[in-house]
Image (cartoon, rainbow, N blue to C red):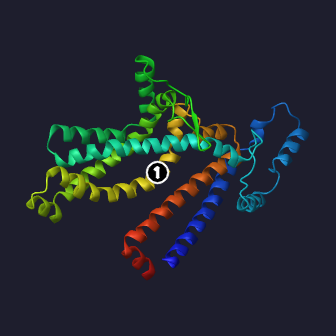
Amino acid sequence: MPVYFIRRMMQSVLVLFVMSLLVFVGVFAIGNPIDILISPEADQHEIERATRALGLDKPLWEQYGLFVVNALKGDLGRSFVFNIPAIDLILQRMPATMELAITATFMGVLLGIPLGMWAGLRPESFSGKLIMSGSILGFSLPTFWVGLMLIMIFAVFLGWLPSTGRGQTREFLGVHLSILTWDGLRHLAMPAFNLALFKLSLVIRLARAGTREAILQDYVKFARAKGVSSRRIIGVHVFKNIMIPIVTVLGLELGSTIAFAVVTETVFAWPGMGKLIIDSINLLDRPVIVAYLMVIVFMFIFINLVVDLLYSVLDPRVRISESKG
């Protein structure tokens, strides 16, 4: 186990280093922020002074070297626009994004598992076919279009829910959360459902496939032969077994939920990291762009590492195969 952990940590560090290089070079190529940050009427002397002040006069390799050295100290640069540490700016927006992503994941699990199990237990029924058809729509419809339709129906036509913003928040353990107030829940409902739609469809299909497979297993047949009630068979034997792939996939999908919240946050003007990165791209605020992408990459790596380690604990065959490799 220690050897496996060390190997996975070394792989994670290597991936993080490679991604930092790709991110830094990619952001460097998108344009010159000086063209946006200073007045078009500025003379050449003012342009050169601003370039030196932001450290953009150095060669790319030197800028990257300084970035790596400072990143190892926890400094990902200062925002060109706000003149504060980029990581602080991201951490200010992170609670809103995490709240949205976790709520969306919870909604996908809460609705997807029972719907998927129902479709798996009654595959030929009208309700089962309707659920599976709905899951196909959830995969197919663009997120931004669904968001606009939700705003049009529930905010414009019906007037039930607010269309944009986060609403009132309440502090809990030093973090401001909107789920603790009624106004915040009303603001959270549409963007959370919009972000959860893809995860909901995914969980439905996983739960249906797992249910169809589990009900054919010998332990289910033996339980029925012993006279165990159908409710207990479904709630204990079937449910526990379909949760293994669902938990695994959702653990890996949580990172993508956080990353792809950018579309939902833009549509609903949700003040999270996604909206921040869009504004930063429009302003060519390089430190914020790089810091955001590095945070997202770190989240992906960390979640994958945790899932791998959990697999190595739950399934000894993973450790055996790794040691042989």
Q: Which residue reaches farthest bottom?
A: 324
Q: Nearer the viewer, residue 58 or 71?
A: 71
Would you identify the image quadrant in which residue 82 lies?
Answer: top right
Residue 283, position as x, y percentages in the image: 69, 38
Q: Nearer the viewer, residue 107 or 255?
A: 107
Position of 285 with respect to 264 (left or right) is right
Give me the residue at 62% from left, 39% from top.
Answer: 276
Give above or below for 13 relative to 2: above
Residue 86, position as x, y percentages in the image: 70, 47
Residue on which the image places disc 1: 254
Give above or below for 92 relative to 18: above
Position of 315 with respect to 131 (left or right) is right
Residue 30, position as x, y percentages in the image: 67, 46
Is the residue marked by circle 1 packed among few (<14), some (14-19), or many (20+) residues within 10 Å? many
Give me the residue at 55% from left, 55% from top.
Answer: 299
Figure quadrant of the C terminus: bottom left
Would you identify the image quadrant in which residue 36 lies?
Answer: top right
Q: Which residue reaches farthest right?
A: 45
Position of 319 with respect to 11 (left or right) is left
SS at badge 1? helix
Amino acid type assigned to the residue bearing label 1 in the image: Leu
Give me the residue at 75% from left, 61% from top.
Answer: 61
Residue 213, position as x, y percentages in the image: 21, 58
The mark tally for this picture is 1
